[in-house]
Image: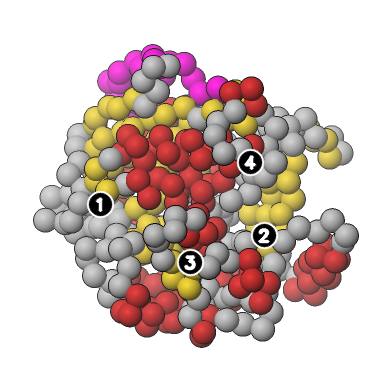
Amino acid sequence: MGRGAAAERFFSDKEAFHAIAQVASELPGAQHYVGGNAALIGQKFAANSDLKVLLCGPVGPKLHELLDDNVFVPPESLQEGDEFHLILEYQAGEQWGQLRAPHANRFIFSHDLSNGAMSTLEVFMSSLEEFQPDLVVLSGLHMMEGQSEALQRKRLSEVVASLSDIPTDVPVHLELASMTNRELMSSLVHQQVFPAVASLGLNEQELLFLSQSASGPHSTLTSWSGVPDVGMVSDILFWILKEHGRNHTRASALTRIHFHTLAYHILATVDGHWANQLAAVAAGARVAGTQACATEAIDAGRVSLRAPREFLTSRLEAASRIVLNPNEPVVQWQREGVSFHFTPVLVCRDPLRTVGLGDAISAEGLLYSEARPHS
């Protein structure tokens, strides 16, 4: 909260968590929303009436009732009780003890064992054949932090085995979320999870933690101060795609990363695999401004521009200096077969809700992205 950083943690005491969740749920002003990265991304897709969404995850009665009619849940995914995630949201300037938040954000905690154990993975795989998807979105791997190391290893290898059964012309997007377990993050990078997915979605906390866990660039940095440096972010994105993405010598599927932070977004793609990146990154930035303010279109009176007006495209090698042009807000640059598309975000000054913004951004970006079949 002191840094205004989004975070999510596993709450290990089951009884205490359920007692808190029950009190919160029964308060007169309690609000229940669709939760979980996959469900939120699915809801965003389902808002387009011509899209059908298959959601496989532990779905209780309350969640089922809140889901869009275009979201289909296999009967095997339904369970008697809901998994609750508790969201603590705060506005810019709010205080808690000695802490004052520099900007609005949220802290999430849960005791969600069924998502952490990837309990519906097998149901998902058996449902895919009939559903014939154009895109697969995977999330919730961060929730494995509540599981034993042995179970983490077992489930990760089963996730990878399952992903290899998905037809190669169907892109798989992995949405990352807040983590503290370096071994688990390192396993995602090295144990074939990254090479098995075509696309990643993440924010500045996850990006830096990923670099720290896998000894990437700028990994000695302990945290970002203020708006993350564009050159540093660009270096880490480039390293992920070069070290773990698809190229002439590596049979990895990873060719796309959608990075989002409060002030700007970057879409990094390996050349030849994706099209329409300009529209995709712009759409992601637009939904960040409208959803946080709960408006249909960007309301100029309620947003501010916090992105750097000029920046370097790298901190590690010879870089271009880019000065933003308001008439062409999406900027593009290249680096050894990787294209970067950068856009500032019009940030909502008094957001009504910060939760689920990353999922809406990733969903919107995916909706506009055009995957080119692997040659």
Q: Earlier in the sequence, mark 1 or mark 2?
A: 2
Quarter of the image for residue 375 reads bottom left
Alpha-carbon distance for marks 4 and 1? 30 Å
In percent of width and height, residue 368 lies at 35, 46
Residue at disc 2, secondary structure? loop
Alpha-carbon distance for marks 3 and 4? 22 Å
In percent of width and height, residue 81 lies at 69, 79
Alpha-carbon distance for marks 3 and 1? 23 Å
Q: Say which amino acid is labelled 1.
A: Ala
* Segment colored magenta: 305-325
Q: Residue at x 63, y 41 (%)?
A: 294
Circle 3: is it few (<14), some (14-19), or many (20+) Cα within 10 Å? Answer: some
Instruction: Residue under label 2, please give it.
Output: 33
Count of labels in the image: 4
Q: Earlier in the sequence, mark 3 or mark 4?
A: 3
Please tell me the numbered disc located at residue 70.
3
Q: Residue at x 54, y 34 (%)?
A: 297
Near-viewer residue (276 or 23): 276
Please tell me the numbered disc located at residue 371.
1
In percent of width and height, residue 103 lies at 68, 32
Quarter of the image for the N terminus: give it.
top right
Q: Say which amino acid is labelled 4.
A: Ala
